[in-house]
Image (tube, helix red, strand yellow):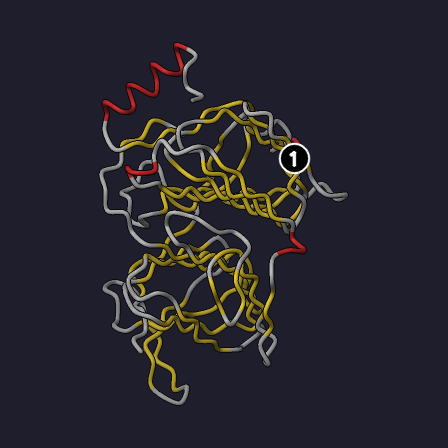
Amino acid sequence: MTFRPVLSESQAVPTLEGAGVHLHRVFGYSEENLCDPFLMMDDFRNDDPAKYKDGFPWHPHRGIETITYVLEGQVEHGDSLGNRGVLEAGSVQWMTAGSGIMHQEMPTGNDRGQMHGFQLWANLPSSLKMTAPRYQDVQGSDIPTVVDDDGTAIRVITGNFWGKTGPVDGVAADPLYLDVSVPPNAEKTLQVDTYSSAFAYIFAGSGTFRDASEPIGVQVEKEFLGEELNIRDLSGNRTLVRFDTGDEIRVRAGPQGMRFLLVSGKPIREPVAWHGPIVMNTRQELMEAVRDLQQGTFIK
């Protein structure tokens, strides 16, 4: 077994999207594609309805998959194919845009006005860029949760973990998507595929991840926890941690506990050409997509 070293740590950045939704961008767009096959991730969390109520009106997608995970409030969605639905707290939508779809997402808060969720974009390989669109709407009650003896609770959205299989399937990146809650001061070792890209996004509490070597320019504390470990202190809330290769991640929660998303997927390693919510391999393919939009032939 080899522990994954921490490659980098960064904070999500305040951003405006849609019709004026205030959110935090975890990674994506202007950055180098360091989380291949994942392109972008947003944390939309707010308790002021004025900062999210106008939502994400009709817009196109092509060449990617969007994964929306709602923790508080709800998101009403609709698309050009006639699909309609509401994502309640705890539920997930995994949308394969493929050859093209027009859709909208309109959030509403809970009874206290709170809205919280995440949207992750996963790239599609060139062979599946123009596949037929597909939805997987999963209710929170259908997402398995496994609880360890120390109280660590893990929701398995997709992939296999601790004997549970997530309900989302048939995704190109063969991803693992977990919602992990570690109780105060507990330490856990979590297995991941050795060569998949992997990252953690801490959105509540704080803690530390074991590092195989001391990263340059970062203060490292050494503690004796049955063995001498090099670990990196993390500020916790809205912190992205990228990992290098290896098959295990060791995490230790702080005194308030820690909750984070753990995501991994197989890199595609293909050229990426962006035009907003359209992601293809070449500029020519982007130009074709724009022509399709202008000529009314975007939906295949």
What percent of the width, then of the height, locates residue 290? 34, 17
Q: Quadrant of residue 220?
A: bottom left
Q: Residue furthest top?
A: 295
Q: Which residue is mark 1?
A: 85
Of the 4 image quadrants, the one containing the N terminus is bottom left
Q: Is residue 159 left or right of residue 9?
A: right
Image spot of residue 265 (x, y percent) = 36, 54
Residue 53 or residue 169, whichever sits in front: 169
* Residue at image point 60% right, 48% down: 138
Q: Is residue 215 left or right of residue 262?
A: left
Q: Is residue 59 above or below residue 91?
A: above
Rendered position, 214 above or below 134: below
Q: Residue furthest right?
A: 111
Q: Is residue 60 above or below residue 66?
A: above
| Observer-nearest of 91 and 171 | 171
Which residue of the protein is positioned furthest toward the bottom in this rendering?
Answer: 226
Residue depicted at 59% across the width and 81% down the height: 149
Q: Quadrant of the C terminus?
A: top left
Which residue is at a point 32% across and 54% down the rendered structure image? 266
Looking at the rendered structure, the secondary structure element under dot 1 is strand
At label 1, counting other C-alpha atoms closer than 10 Å, the crowd grade (few under 14, some 14-19, many 20 or more) is few
Viewer-proximal residue, 100 or 212? 100
Q: Where residue 217 sits: x, y (%)?
A: 25, 62
Name the residue: 42% across, 59% down.
Answer: 200
